[in-house]
Image (cartoon, rainbow, N blue to C red):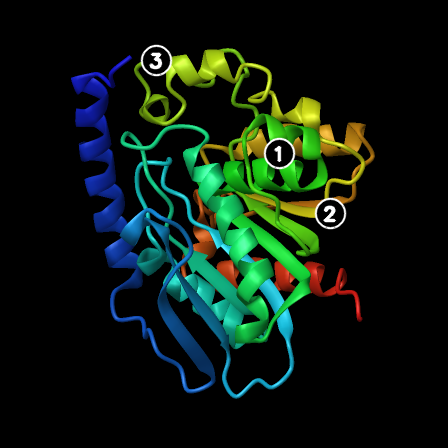
Amino acid sequence: MKVTQAVLDDIKRTTDQWRASDEKRDAGLPTEFPDVKRYDNISYGPAGEENLLDVYTPKDVTQSVPTIIDIHGGGNVYGSKELYQHYCLDWAKHGFGVVNFNYRLAPQNIFPGALKDTALVAKWVADHGQDYHLDTNNVFIIGDSAGGTLAYQYLTAYANPKYRKALGLVSSGQLVVRGGALNSGFYFVKRPGAITPDSLMSAYFTPEMMQKYDQELHTENYVTPDFPPVFVMTANHDFLHDEGVRFDQFLLDHHLAHRFASFGTESDPREHVFQLNQRDAVAAKANQQQREFFRSLFVEK
């Protein structure tokens, strides 16, 4: 089924708004820091510019550092590593090696394409991370919004070979994922009414793919006790706030290690993916809490 013109128009209108908002938020932020080393535009797959990644590490590092793989958001129709460089550089400033990557977007690329790209990145880190002093024994997956969905699905596949095989994902090799951060994510794709045929998300989760992968899109049915510990974060004015609450309850019901946090108050609210704002003190606090959560999961060789 071809994406309707109405959906294409919605994608154009919405992504123009998102781009204007993101550019305003990040205007004037530096892209170089004296204590961070950048490696830009490294190929990890066959799709040209859409399969490029950057690596950011603390400068002059001689020993391996814990590794973040960050999955950008944007409804699977928008976003790039350039838009997320400021957020990712901040993690590098705090002692992490960060892999920040492009993946193929809808409507040209539909489910599970972006997830396959994520798995390719993880395999690239397993194969090449040591060349950049990335610790492949202490890897953490971060995703927000649509990237949160991808991070959740990838972590499920990492812990469950059956799920990985069903979706045709490459193995991550010797990579050891210790935990993740799921920020403002969308976790229950098959919940009744969650994705309608005329919604923006239908450009990636097309009706055909929703039917073909009916079982696999019930990701919750593939979560095993080996699912890595996660920090689930939302905000009081996040339009996906209730998704975070539902996922928190799911993890509680299944006795899976995690932390749940919602930021913002009625007098000082926070919105969807607020943590990306490098000028916001509440975002800085939230990001610091996630760093501390990851550090609690480090395993020394």
Q: Is residue 266 visible?
A: yes
Spatial CA span between label 2 and label 3: 33 Å
Q: Secondary structure at mark 2?
A: loop
Q: Is residue 36 left or right of residue 182?
A: left
Which mark lies nearer to you, 2 or 1? 1
In this figure, which residue is indicated by the disc labeled 1?
A: 164
Residue 197: mark: 3
Q: Is residue 218 left or right of residue 87?
A: right
Residue 27: where, in percent of width, then height? 25, 65
Residue count near mark 2 (Cα–Cα under 10 Å), binned few <14, some 14–19, many ≥20: many
Q: Earlier in the sequence, mark 3 or mark 1?
A: 1
Q: Residue 24: which quarter of the image?
A: bottom left
Which mark lies nearer to you, 3 or 1? 1
Residue 275: where, in percent of width, then height? 48, 55
Amino acid carrying label 2: it is Pro
* Discs 2, 3 touching: Cβ within 8 Å: no
Quarter of the image with the N terminus is: top left
Q: Is residue 265 left or right of residue 53?
A: right
Spatial CA span between label 2 and label 1: 19 Å
Q: Earlier in the sequence, mark 2 or mark 3?
A: 3
In this figure, which residue is indicated by the disc labeled 2?
A: 229
Q: Secondary structure at mark 1?
A: helix
Quarter of the image with the C terminus is: bottom right
Above or below, comparing residue 73 to residue 24 in the picture? above
Q: Secondary structure at mark 3?
A: loop
* Discs 3, 1 touching: Cβ within 8 Å: no
